[in-house]
Amino acid sequence: MSRLMRFVPTLACLAATAFAAPSIAWAANYWDKLEWQVRPLVLVEGGSSADNWTDRLLNDRCALAERRIHWLVIEEDGAVWRRFDGGEAADFESTRLDEGAAASVRDRVGWSSGDDTRLLLFGLDGQRKYSGRPDALETIWALIDRMPMRRNELAREPDDCASP
């Protein structure tokens, strides 16, 4: 038996394993797709105060867009909705994430049924930068504006939302 013939079964097994291995699902890539592109801001709904935060965020589109915020909402029942994708031409939306992507968001946030309302901010690097209930959105915006990547952005292009 030639040397090549002895390796054919091994090569066939390796090829079959490579192609048969489960690919990383879109849900597993959800955060990977966001990393270095946008800053996820997750609103965990846990009561009536969540409506107040939704209204505040809906009234501050410019700040969301300027800071490349990818706004997600986790409802009390665990459903996850994308409300603003953080892209340059982003607009408000109500897009429910599929269960796999929703599960990855809930896991990343550490969500569990019965959680209180809170905001969680993740940086461009995907790391959690804030979790809590700030008095105002300006607290979140100021935190972002102190981040090194944001300071670099501001050095290149001044904030279009800044007051005169």
Image (cartoon, rainbow, N blue to C red):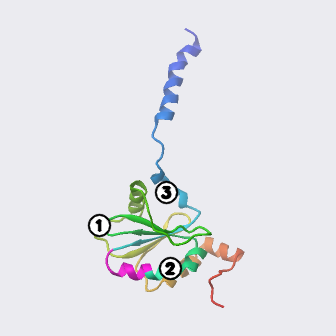
Give the alpha-carbon distance from disc 3 to disc 1, as whole Å.
Answer: 22 Å
Label 3 with label 1: CB-CB less than 8 Å: no
Percent of width and height locating residue 32: 52, 56
- List the residue tagged with mark 3: 30
Q: Is residue 75 above or below residue 141?
A: above
Residue furthest to the left in view is: 114
- List the residue tagged with mark 1: 113
- Which mark is first along the chain, 1 or 2? 1
Q: What residue is shown at x 62% (from left), y 70% (from top)?
A: 149
Say the numbered circle drawn on residue 140.
2
Q: Secondary structure at mark 2?
A: helix
The amino acid type of the residue labelled 1 equals Ser
Q: What residue is shown at x 50% (from left), y 53% (from top)?
A: 29
The amino acid type of the residue labelled 3 equals Tyr
- Report the span colored magenta: 46-54
Q: What residue is shown at x 28% (from left), y 70% (from top)?
A: 114
Q: Quadrant of the C terminus?
A: bottom right
